[in-house]
Image (spheres, rainbow, N blue to C red):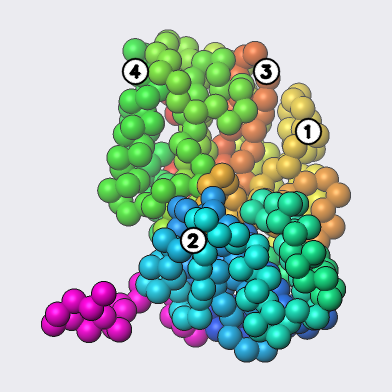
Amino acid sequence: MKVPGIDNAVVQKDLAFPIVEFQRRLKAVRQEMAKRRLDLLVVSTPENIYYLSGYHTVGYYSSQFLLIPRNGDPIHITRGIEETNVKVLSWIDRSTSYMDHESPVELLATTIQSMGCANSTIGVEKISWFLSILDYERLKQLLHGAIFEDGSHTVESARVVKSNLELECIRQAARIADAGMEAGIGQIRAGANENDVAAEIQRVVTRMGSEYPGLPIFVASGVRTSHAHATWSGRQILKGDPVLLEISGCVRRYSAALMRLAVVKPASRELERMEEVSRKALENMIEAIRPGRPLEEVWNVWSRTVTEGGYEGRFKRTGYSIGINFPPDWGEGYMLSFKRGETRTLRPNMTFHIPSLVKVFGFADAGTSETVLVTETGCEILTNCKRQLFVC
């Protein structure tokens, strides 16, 4: 509807980055498509859609797609209510949408036909959480003349190395995480409540400009620190309790994360020893990071340090790519992680969150972490909170 006195054709864009940055990303993804001999890529992962277009919404629980042809203009497909976000947040103007009584996958098939790609080689992100098996099977029925290939990691191959513009967002997120951690530690004392600690962290990071995180704030005290991914539960913090905090800052959907351990006086010697081993393992790992080194080799440094310290050092990955995030994760670990068997090598401008955990189930977990950047010669630590056991 036209509003008198207002030019309804003028839309003020709110782009996360200059258009030239998005064009650079699109070019890189199309080069990867060419290597894979894909004529069309159907992107359904929210982070990948954001990376290529700038479009984002908390409504990604509904079907949404970005169609990337080898040549020609990309096209958004969204739920009808989300088209306003496409108009404002995406540099890509071509879009179509479905109403809630209509089938998204049928619109997807019709749009692909209109692009002249019904009999082409089409890549789909089989790894995506947001393309159901049912929808994929239906799409193949509707486009029976097409050849379907796995297009997983086509976009991620470009995402894993960050541009300078992306790094600026991650650096800002790191400053926010530092401030949030200091605020949380400042709330820890005997008689305090986990909820109060979490609330203060959230207040500080939000006021500093953090967007909603991909994961909740992790605040756990006492034996609950030994429970994986424990969030605040209303527990009262007692004397001698460990308190494990893990938080993130998020700027333009780019995150940096940070973990620290505190203890309410008196600190047991075992807790002190666990934190020392955790911290030493992290520091040794950071020293081992350099371009060209396989990630497994760096993971082995962490594993050996923890094992020699008397704890279990074989059970988990220790560090994962971090950057664009939407719930339910703030990391990009499915793209690349420090773990056993990972033979891919480090490259400059990769960013990682490296949580070093020493675990004793039923007693406590001791952990410390940093968000880091791989440089031309080694590693830069982006987070800047004092690395120690905080005795409160």
Check disc 3: other Cα within 10 Å, few if <14, some if 14-19, many if 20+: few
Label 2 near label 3: C-beta < 8 Å?
Answer: no
Q: Residue 137: x, y in percent?
A: 78, 57
Towards the viewer: 25 or 179: 25
Q: Residue sitting at 37 percent across and 52 percent down?
A: 210
Q: Residue sitting at 62 percent across and 14 percent down?
A: 363
Towards the viewer: 372 or 154: 154
Say whether disc 1 or disc 4 marks the residue closer to the N-terminus: 4
Q: Amino acid at mark 3?
A: Phe
Say whether disc 2 or disc 4 marks the residue closer to the N-terminus: 2
Label 1 near label 3: C-beta < 8 Å?
Answer: no
Task: Give how far apart the Cα atoms at labels 3 and 1 are.
Answer: 13 Å
Say whether disc 2 or disc 1 marks the residue closer to the N-terminus: 2
Say whether disc 3 or disc 1 marks the residue closer to the N-terminus: 1
Check disc 4: other Cα within 10 Å, few if <14, some if 14-19, many if 20+: some
Label 4 near label 2: C-beta < 8 Å?
Answer: no
Residue 30 seen anywhere in this rendered image of the structure: no
Quadrant of the frame with the N terminus: bottom left
Picture disc at residue 99: 2
**Residue at image mark 1:** 315
**Residue at image mark 3:** 361
Q: Residue 323: x, y in percent?
A: 55, 59
Q: Amino acid at mark 2?
A: Met
**Residue at image mark 4:** 192
Q: Is residue 16 magenta?
A: yes
